[in-house]
Image (tube, rainbow, N blue to C red):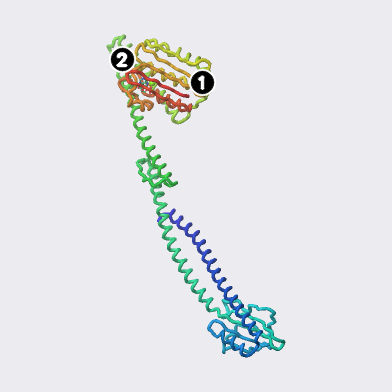
Amino acid sequence: MNRISIKLTAYFFIAVLIMETSLILYLHQNIIHTRVDEEFSRLLATGSNHRDVLSENYSDTTMKHIVLMEKDEEREVLITNNQGEIIRSSEENIETLKRDLPQVNDLDLQIDQILVSDWKRSSYIVSAHPYKVNPSQSGYVIMFQSTHPIEQLVGKLNLHFGLAGVTSVVALLIIYAVLSKFLTRPLIRMKKATEKLSKGNFKVSLPFIGSDELGELSTSIQKLADDLERLKTERNEFLASVAHELSTPLTYLIGYSKVAIRQGVSEQERQHYLVIIAEESDRMKELVKNLLDLAKMDENTFTVSKEYFEARPFFEDIFKLVEPSFKLKKLKLDLICDMDFKIHADPLRLEQIVLNLLDNALKYSLEQSTVKMKVSKKGKKSVISVVDVGIGIPLEEIDFIFEKLYRVEKSRSRTSGGSGIGLAIVKELVEAHDGSIDVISNLGEGSTFTIII
Ligand SMILES: Nc1ncnc2c1ncn2[C@@H]1O[C@H](COP(=O)(O)OP(=O)(O)OP(=O)(O)O)[C@@H](O)[C@H]1O
Ligand SMILES: [Mg+2]
C-alpha cells in the first residue's frame, strides 16, 4: 500500500470512529436512562397505589392482598409499622431484601421517595411510601424492584451496539481502502508521468478520468507533456533550419574565398568574388542578428515602451527610407493615412514591424505594381494594412508563414534573399503590443497584411 492511501484511510477512519463511538455511547446511555426512569416511575406509582389502598382499608386482609399482588419474580413489597418492624412481606427470606434496605427504623418521610437508586450495585431499587391511618397505625409500604431486567437490557444493548460497532468498523475499513485506492491510483499515475517528464521523456499518456479536480490536473499534465513534446520537435527542426541557413552562405564564403586566393585569377574576377563574399557575409550577419532578436523576444527580455505619436509623419519618414528600393523595382508606393491621429505604440518596434511588411511587399510584388499602406483609427486602436499586388501566398501555406525560418517556396525566397524570419519577428512584436496580425492572400493576385495595434 502506498503512503497517501494509508494517510487518507487513517484520517477518515479516525474521524468516523470518533463520531461513531460518541454516537453509540450517547444512544447507549440514553436508552438505559430512559429505561431506569421508567422503572422508577412504575415503582413509585405502584407503591403509592398500595399505600392509598392500605390507608383507606387498613386491615390484615388488605395487607395480604397487597403482598399477594406483588408475589412475582421481579417485584417485592414490605409493610412496616410505626415501630419500624416489618409486619408483612412478599418474600419469605426477608434478609435478602434487607441487604438492600437502609435502616427502616430511622426513616422519617412525609412523601414517597426512592431509597435506593443505584441499580448498578444493588440487586433492587427501593422506594418508600409513608402511610398513616392514625398515630398507632402508621408506617411504610416499601417497594423493591429487581435490577435484573435492567442488567439484562444493558447486556443486550452492549452486545448489539458492540456488534454494530465492529461491523461498521470493518465496513468502513473496506470502503475507505477501496475509496483511497480509487482516489490515489490516478495520483500515482500522474506522479509517474511527471517523473518521466522531469527525466526528459515527454511521451506520456494519461487516461481521461473525468472533469473533477483530479481530472483537471491529469488533463493539465497531459497537455504539458504534449506541449513539451511539440516544443522539443520544434526546437530540433528550428536548429536544423538554422544550421542549414548558416551553412548555405558559409559554403559560398568558403568556395569563393578559395577561388579568390587562387593564383592566376584576374583582378576583375577576384573583385567579383569578393563582392559575392561581402554580400553573403552581410546576409549571414543579418540572419544572426534576426535570430538573436527572436531569441530575446522568446525570453521576454526586450521591452515595449508605448507612447503617443503622430501617425502621418511617422509613416512618411518610413516611406522616405524605403522609397529608393521600391523605385529600383519600379514599384509605386501609396500612403493612405487619416490626418490628425495619434498612434499608441513603441515607435522603434512599430518601425521594425512596418519595415518587415514593406520588405515582403517589395520582395514578393510584381514589377510596376503598387503597394498601398492604409492607416486608420478604430476605437482606441490603430489599423495598419500593407496591400500588395504580388505573387500571393498559397492558401495551405498561410498558417505557417509566421513560423520561424518558414518560407513558402524555399527556392523562391533564396533568389530574393529571404530567410523566413521577418514575419516571426513581426508576430512577436505585434503580440508584445497586445495587438493582432491577419493576412488575406490569393495566389497570383497579391496579399494584404493587417495589424491592429
Ligand atoms: N507579401 C507577401 N507576398 C507573398 N508572399 C509573402 C509575402 N510576405 C511573406 N510571404 C511569404 O511568407 C514567407 C515568410 O515571410 P518572412 O518575412 O517571414 O520571411 P522572408 O521574407 O522570406 O525572409 P526575411 O523576412 O527573414 O528576410 C516568405 O518566404 C514568403 O514566401
Ligand atoms: Mg520578410
Report the front residue among 341 and 7.
Answer: 341
Q: Residue 297: x percent and y percent? A: 45, 28
Front: mark 1 or 2: 1
Q: Where's residue 380, x and y in %?
A: 52, 24
Quarter where residue 371 is shown: top left
Toward the viewer: 132 or 8?
A: 132
Kindly give the residue lying farthest to the left in the view shown: 264
- Which three-letter amino acid code belongs to the residue tagged 1? Ile
Mark 1 or mark 2, earlier in chain: 2
135 shown above or below 281: below
> Is residue 430 positioned above or below 138 on the image?
above
Disc 2 under 8 Å from ligand 1? The reply is no
262 sits left or right of 308 in the view: left
Q: Give the quarter the ligand 1 occupies.
A: top left
Q: Where is residue 355 in the image (x, y as percent from the top left)?
A: 43, 18
Vertical order, 321 against 127 (above or below): above
The answer to whether residue 255 of the structure is visible from this angle is: yes
Q: Nearer the viewer, residue 147 or 364?
A: 147
In which quarter of the view is residue 418 placed?
Answer: top left
Residue reaching furthest to the front? 56
Residue 303, above or below 137:
above
Q: For residue 260, which numbered disc appears in the image?
A: 2
Q: What element carries label 1?
A: strand
